[in-house]
Image (cartoon, grey):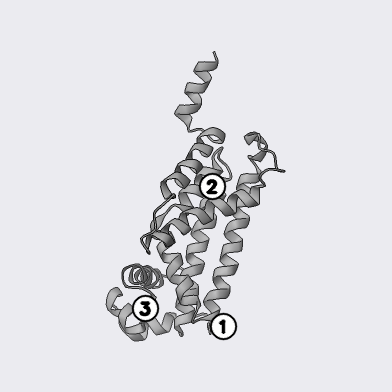
Amino acid sequence: MASSRRVGSTTSRTRTLLLNSAQQLMLEHGYAAVTYRGLAARAGVAASLVQYYFPTLDDLFVALLRSGTDRILERFSEASQTEQPLRAVWEYASDRTATALLLEFMALANHRKAIQSEIGRGGERVRDAQLEAVSRQWTQYGLDERAVSPAGLLFMMNAIPRMLALEETFGTHTGHRDAVETIERFLDHIEPRRHEREEQDLGAD
């Protein structure tokens, strides 16, 4: 269970170092490698200092999830001001490092309820931010919401890369390239890149 007591400044360099080191350990060796002793060794600090900032390991994992969620929300806040928010969603969902980290957290959540709840809350916040970003551009896409809704499209765009990564761990690859190419052709149609738009404009003249 995560502690309700906040220890150490959330903006301190030491805390950031510990969170970055914990993330590296999870990606390289799995969540089980994240212990007070293991994290202290990776960060080059005393184990007691790790425990000062994070009284429980749940505190550490929750803090790592929240810091990641905050970065993602900032990313989609910026994307909402552009003409290509769906490409931002696809690039985010296709980030293999982020997907690997999420899968580790999902495995960890089977043993820690606090992590399960935090993943759910963070996921809803990210999806809401994506929906807000895409909704601003939706009328420009010319899509019929009776055929595809913004929320439904976002779910598919987030889910496909993660399912690809999951299946690949078991050696399943059939249809993966086709799925990616289908999404990318769709994006080329509704959110053409700048040079593609310029070529289309020249062709129309």
25 versus 137 height, above or below: below
- The answer to whether marks 3 and 1 mark residues whose Cβ atoms lie closer than 8 Å is no
Q: Amino acid at mark 2?
A: Glu
Residue occupied by mark 1: 4
Question: Is 22 on the left or on the right of 134, as rendered?
Answer: left
**Earlier sequence position, callout 2 versus callout 3:** 3
Q: CA distance from mark 3 to mark 1?
A: 21 Å
The image shows residue 5 at horizontal and vertical percentages of: 54, 83
Q: Mark 2: which secondary structure?
A: helix
- Identify which amino acid the numbered label 3 is placed on: Val
Please state the horizontal and vertical placement of residue 136, each as a whole percent of the image: 65, 42
Check whether the beta carbons of the residues at disc 2 and disc 3 lie within 8 A of each other.
Answer: no
Q: Secondary structure at mark 3?
A: loop
150 vs 168: above or below: above
Which numbered mark, 2 or 3, is in the foreground of this view? 3
Distance CA(mark 1)–CA(mark 2): 32 Å
The extreme right residue here reads 146
**Horizontal and vertical percent position of residue 156:** 56, 52
Counting residues from the start of the chain, the first of labels 1 and 2 encountered is 1
Task: Tell me which residue sits at (57%, 63%) in the image.
Answer: 123
Q: Quadrant of residue 114?
A: bottom right
Which quadrant would the C terminus be assigned to in this image?
Answer: top right
Residue holding disc 3? 34
